[in-house]
Structure formats: structure tokens, C-alpha cells
Image (tube, rainbow, N blue to C red):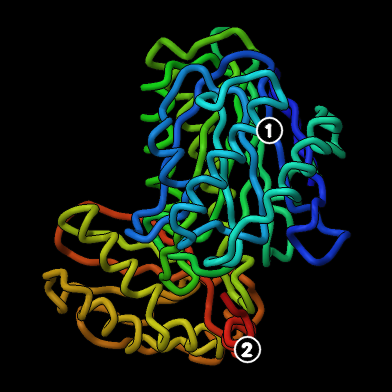
């Protein structure tokens, strides 16, 4: 789905031969017209792709010009050659737009342990440079160029009034499997024409990622290439300096990132349900996060949702082994707004009605309430199906 491109950005996606299917784009360029701000958040896995190492060293920065993204090959676990190829990829992208290597960022996603086909990358950068634009075709091709196993394109956009001027925030993401909190097998680029400082951009993105990309799970597997970038061109000529403007921009960025984050487990490989889990009443947000992570990563909870089974025992017991202290007698669980469990005991409810509500809706809502405090969190996850197992048993590194 095409979205408006913020002022100061041009982009394109092309097929250069990394993916075997010639109809699928596998290289994307996103270029700014002038020096711009970039901030990033990255995977917390100790095993990371060369692109993550390079980008971490460069962000946040105030003189960004181009990001080059390839899909189909993660350039992870490729040693010194992988590092060298990553540097060459940024050099080629920078050279193509008249920038320096230090002004270029790179993202790679796909199969790990394989070397990048650098001649194809080189030709792809040249082809993408010749096509960069701001129209719908340019945007959509760029989004397709970052995808791997995605079944649909993941984009989001909002506008916000800052100091009487309209500021645009538009983003794209990819991800469908190997998804776990604290970043996942996902890439995300958020573009805005607001004028930001590098420290402010980093703070804004970190806040948004905490509410969104760090609250999703398909199977809890944190991967090697996970990257989310916030790019600010300054093309709108306005800076959110007042407290009200800063809050409005943060809310807009948060909404864009949450919308994208929900799309990732919605596209979870083989998924038949999106699970939205609210955990409330915890002593700390860290406690709420740990419980939510444990529940949404439980195979028994996931398969119960797949089977449209309101199995309160699996959900409550998963919370119990999360390693967070709480009083079991104060736990309440609702599924799709029906009270299932209260004060440490199940309550009477119509199991068929609840099961039918799960079967009839793609999104299943769980509310797990505790009596320890006022901290809360919202998590999103996919269910677990036979199709997920088949897909990933056939997928090879």
C-alpha cells in the first residue's frame, strides 16, 4: 500500500538477482536530498550481521544521506569477508548519490551464513539510483525490496501539526518469522520531514520501539539483523521544540510504530490469529513485560489459541513460571471480554460462546490482571500452527 513520501526523500527498489524470483525486488535505496539525521535501535542478540555492527557505530548521526537495503541474504556469520562486503556496499551506495561512506547505512536480511553477491549488489545500486523517485511506484518497489517471507507489504503513515506546519511520518517494515521481543527478524525505516537533532531522534525512536517492536513475538527468536531506523530530512523546515509539539510528534511516531509492529505477528508464518495480550496490575513494567513475554511465547498457549480453546490453565500457569512474584489469589483473566478466571479460581462461563468468538475473529484479546501495582504493558503475538512448522522445517540457512 503506497504512502506519502515525506519531503526530502527519494527511494526505489529493484531486482538485482539476490532472490531467485526475477519478479521480486531485492535491493532498496532510500536517499535524502541533503544531510539528514539518523537514529537506530538494533537486535540484542550477541550474534549479529555485519550491517548491525556498522550501523551501531554510525548512529545517531546528523549527516546521513543514504541507506541501502538488500533482502534474501543477511550477510550474517560471514566473518571478515562479510564485514568487508558490508563496507563496500555502503561505499557504493554513498558514491552513487554523491556522499561519503560515513553518510551511508546498510541493512541486510535473509539467509545467514552466505556471502553477498557483490557484483549483483553493485549493479542493483546503479539500477536503483537511476529509478529513485517520490511517486507511488517508487515507494511500493522500495517496500517490496526489503521483504523476505512477508505475505503482504507493511507500511504506515501519519501527519501531525507542528508549529503550524504539517509534518509527515511514513514508515515501512518487514518481518514474519524469527520474531521476539527486544527486536526481531525485522527491518523498519521511519522517514519524517521534521527537523530533529540526532540525540532527540534517538530518544524518540527508543521510546517508540519500547512500545512497539519490543512488544511483539512470533516464537520468541531474536535474530541477527534486526534494525529500526528513524531518518529525519528536515524538509518540512520545522522542529518540535515546545513540550506540546514534542509530545505530539512522539505520539505520532509511537502510533506509526505500533501499527507496523502489529502487522508483523499478524503476518506470522502460518498464523491464523493475532494475539493481543494486556498485562495489568504489576509492581513494575519490567514484571509486566516478563509475564507478557512468557505467556505469548508459550507453545501451549499459542496452540490453544490456534484451536480456539479458552484454556485459562495454560495462560495462568505460564504467568506462574515467568519468574515474577505475585499473589495467585489476585489474578483475573478475560478472553475476548469474557471473564474466565478470578481470585485464583475459574468462573462459570459459556465455553462455546468464547470459543466461537475466537474462531470468528482474527484478533484474540487476552487481559491478564494482577493485584501488585499499577504497571502494565501490551504485547502482540501470533498463534502457532502446523503451517509454521512445515514452513520452517523446509527453510534452510
Mark 1: few/some/many CA within 10 Å (<14, 14-19, 20+): many
In this rendering, does residue 175 appear at all? no
Could you say which is closer to the camera, residue 218 or residue 240?
218
Relative to 7, residue 337 above or below: below
Q: Is residue 304 left or right of residue 191?
A: left
N-term-proximal mark, 1 vs 2 = 1
Q: Position of residue 86 (x, y in %)?
A: 54, 44
The foreground one among 181 and 366 is 181
Q: Residues within 10 Å of mark 2 (few under 14, many from 20)?
A: few
Q: Quadrant of residue 133?
A: top right
Q: Secondary structure at mark 1?
A: strand
Where is residue 24 drawn, in percent x and y?
Answer: 82, 58
Residue at x 60% of width, y 23% of height: 65
Q: Residue at x 59, y 60 (%)?
A: 115
Q: Is residue 41 above or below residue 264?
A: above
Numbered label tally: 2
Q: Answer above or below: position of 306 versus 56.
A: below
Residue 325, relative to residue 76: is it above or below? Answer: below
The residue positioned 44% from the left and 23% from the top of the image is 61
Find residue 62 and report its horizontal and vertical position in percent.
47, 18
**Which label sits on residue 288?**
none
User: Do we see residue 32 in this rendering?
Assistant: yes
Q: For mark 1, what is the residue?
A: 30
Q: Quadrant of residue 367?
A: bottom left
Quarter in which the C terminus is drawn: bottom right
The mark closer to the camera, 1 or 2, is: 1
Q: Is residue 316 left or right of residue 344?
A: right
User: In the rendered view, does 344 fall on the left or right side of 43?
Assistant: left
The disc placed on residue 390 is: 2
Amino acid at each position: 500500500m503506497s504512502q506519502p513520501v515525506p519531503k526530502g526523500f527519494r527511494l526505489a527498489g529493484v531486482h538485482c538477482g539476490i532472490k531467485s524470483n526475477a519478479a521480486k525486488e531485492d535491493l532498496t535505496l532510500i536517499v535524502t536530498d541533503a544531510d539528514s539525521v539518523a537514529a537506530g535501535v538494533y537486535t540484542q542478540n550477541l550474534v549479529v550481521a555485519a550491517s548491525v555492527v556498522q550501523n551501531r557505530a554510525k548512529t545517531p548521526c546528523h549527516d546521513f544521506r543514504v541507506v541501502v537495503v538488500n533482502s534474501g541474504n543477511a550477510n550474517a556469520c560471514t566473518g571478515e569477508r562479510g564485514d568487508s562486503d558490508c563496507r563496500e556496499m555502503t561505499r557504493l551506495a554513498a558514491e552513487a548519490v554523491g556522499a561519503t561512506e560515513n553518510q551511508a547505512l546498510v541493512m541486510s536480511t535473509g539467509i545467514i551464513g552466505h556471502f553477498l553477491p557483490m557484483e549483483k549488489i553493485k549493479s542493483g545500486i546503479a539500477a536503483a539510483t537511476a529509478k529513485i523517485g517520490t511517486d507511488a511506484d517508487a515507494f511500493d518497489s522500495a517496500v517490496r525490496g526489503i521483504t523476505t517471507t512477508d505475505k503482504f507489504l507493511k507500511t504506515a503513515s501519519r501527519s501531525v501539526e507542528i508549529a503550524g506546519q504539517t509534518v509527515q511520518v511514513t514508515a515501512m517494515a518487514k518481518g514474519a518469522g524469527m520474531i521476539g521481543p527486544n527486536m526481531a527478524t525485522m527491518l523498519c525505516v521511519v522517514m519524517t520531514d521534521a527537523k530533529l537533532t540526532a540525540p532527540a531522534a534517538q530518544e524518540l525512536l527508543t521510546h517508540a520501539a519500547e512500545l512497539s517492536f519490543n512488544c511483539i513475538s512470533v516464537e520468541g527468536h531474536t535474530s541477527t539483523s534486526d534494525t529500526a531506523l528513524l531518518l529525519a530530512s528536515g524538509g518540512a523546515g520545522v522542529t518540535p521544540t515546545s513540550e506540546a509539539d514534542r509530545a505530539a510528534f512522539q505520539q505520532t511516531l509511537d502510533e506509526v510504530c505500533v501499527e507496523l509492529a502489529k502487522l508483523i505477528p499478524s503476518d506470522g508464518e502460518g498464523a491464523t490469529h493475532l494475539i493481543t495480550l494486556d498485562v495489568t496490575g504489576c509492581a513494575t513494567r519490567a514484571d509486566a513485560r516478563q509475564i507478557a513475554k512468557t505467556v505469548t511465547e508459550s507453545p501451549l498457549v499459542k496452540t490453544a489459541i490456534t484451536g480456539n480453546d479458552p484454556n485459562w490453565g495454560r495462560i495462568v500457569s505460564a504467568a506462574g513460571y515467568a519468574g515474577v512474584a505475585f499473589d495467585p489469589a489476585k489474578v483475573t483473566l478475560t478472553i475476548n471480554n469474557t471473564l474466565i478466571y478470578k481470585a485464583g479460581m475459574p468462573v462459570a462461563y459459556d465455553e462455546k460462546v468464547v470459543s466461537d468468538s475466537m474462531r470468528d475473529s482474527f484478533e484474540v484479546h487476552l487481559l491478564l490482571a494482577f493485584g501488585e501495582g499499577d504497571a502494565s504493558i501490551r504485547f502482540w503475538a501470533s498463534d502457532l500452527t502446523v503451517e509454521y512448522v512445515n514452513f520452517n522445517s523446509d527453510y534452510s540457512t
